Image: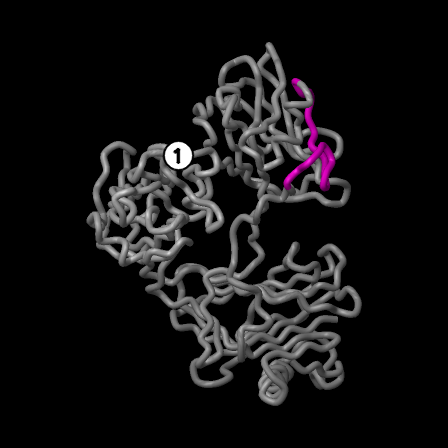
Amino acid sequence: MATKPSTEFLAISATDLSPIENRMAVDRLRSLIATNGAYIKSQDGVADEFADENGVESSTTGYLANSIPTMTGTSAPSGTAIFDAESSPTYAAWKAFDNSASTRWARNSAGQVGWVGYDFGSGNGKIISKMVFTAPTSGNGEMPKNFTIDGWNGSAWIVLETITNAAGYSTSETRDYVFTNTTSYQKYRVNVTVSQDGANVTMGGLAMHEYVTALSANTTYHPASDYYHNPPGGTLSVITNVVGAVYSHSSIYASGYTSAFAFNDDLSTRWAASSNNTGWVQIDLGAGNEKTLVKIIMHANGGGDNQCVDGFTFLGSNDGSSFTTLYTMANGQATTEFGTGAGPSLATFNFTNTTAYRYYRVNITQTGTSSSRSLATVYELYGYEAVTTPASMTIVSDTFTAQTAPSEASLVLLHQPISSVTLNTDVLAYISRDGGTTYTQGTLADGGEYSTGINILTINGLDISAQPSGTNMKYKIVTANVKEQRFHGVWLQWS
């Protein structure tokens, strides 16, 4: 990557562009990249022809890992476990955050009340919108039944979510609670007003997760023609880390093998049944979230030949009790699909399905290749749904550093509409100076045709002075309304 001095970046310095200057910007974009590489940064701008995938953030979106570290004490290694009371040091609040199923926070309370939470520390606030509760191996009957999830605004607790009559927990069960939150809080808590047994209050494990919305999504890079697009006919992953999903199982071998581990996108964990060589694991996508799955990818094996999946059925249901078989792998046939290694191996299974189901279950009917069979186990199960229309696409740039906080910015976009589009409705563009925390939408205008089928779209002199002051420049391009589109390059300048 080459960097040009500001005077060579464009022959103009103002960001409010005339039609002639628009063309100059695009021509300079093309010529600079053709000479110097994929994209070019300067003191007051960036040019990216999408000659490779550099300059655009990865297409990853969703919940980040647990924001709380594995705690070894009230304030170790960082942050602080907070609480209203503890039964004893054995049930200290920090033990709700130590990632151990055999320990827990608890307090004795005839009023069935109590709270536990976490303080990230001054200046380290997080926008938490998902909490994961894990019942302990002992005391699961004391988990919360009625409670609120609260954030501390510096002077008072703000209720973010209220849960009433939560179902009872089985031993080591993991459950997601997802809520709307767009505010960064330093402290969060779970405030229990009624526990499951109506007496003591406990929390076996509590994780807090941030949702990442700033990264690119549904982008496909076309290396032969150097553009990003959202072609129809792809597949969409729907049953790994699903927001609000509930997991269940026929049985578990031990607390570290719970059903949620079959769907958490982490091959270091797994579900395993307590029975010798059979068992099932299930996901409930929730009412209104039914999906029509047509493919699954399963990571199985582990523990050698004895634990490889050797026969299973994949089933769907909308009532949780009456299931339809969607795919069958007869006993003795799956070993060749998965192989016989000691670690998790992958196999893909396609099937015909035209019904959207709420519940999906994989039922292992046989494991192992020897007469002495071992645990029924699944490391990871991914479900895929057919997509027949283009998905909405978001392209977010890397962060580019300005010398000083700019007050305005302009953008030139090389755009190829495959579907008929309306500017600022089907294609939208935004600019940020604080690293993508705050964006200002610009008004895209038609700058004419660059080449056959490729148009020049512009944003001229966008006022970004109302954003929090910063020098971390980003642009964001968003498509909407199932319109297929291609983007060949972006030029961004600030002042």
Residue at figure coordinates x 72%, y 68% from the top left: 401
Number of marks present in the image shown: 1
Helix, strand or loop under label 1: loop
| Residue type, numbered disc 1 | Ile
Q: Position of residue 324 (x, y in %)?
A: 21, 41
Looking at the rendering, the stretch of residues picked out in magenta corresponds to 70-87
Q: Main secondary structure of the magenta part?
A: loop
Q: Position of residue 37 (x, y in %)?
A: 60, 84
Residue at figure coordinates x 75%, y 83% from the top left: 5
Please identify the quarter of the rendering in which residue 411 is found: bottom right
Please identify the quarter of the rendering in which residue 371 is found: top left
Q: Is residue 336 above or below residue 457?
A: above
Q: Which of 154/250 is in front? A: 250
Q: Which of 270/168 is in front? A: 270
Q: Position of residue 250 (x, y in %)?
A: 33, 33
Question: Can you identify the residue that label 1 sits on?
Answer: 252
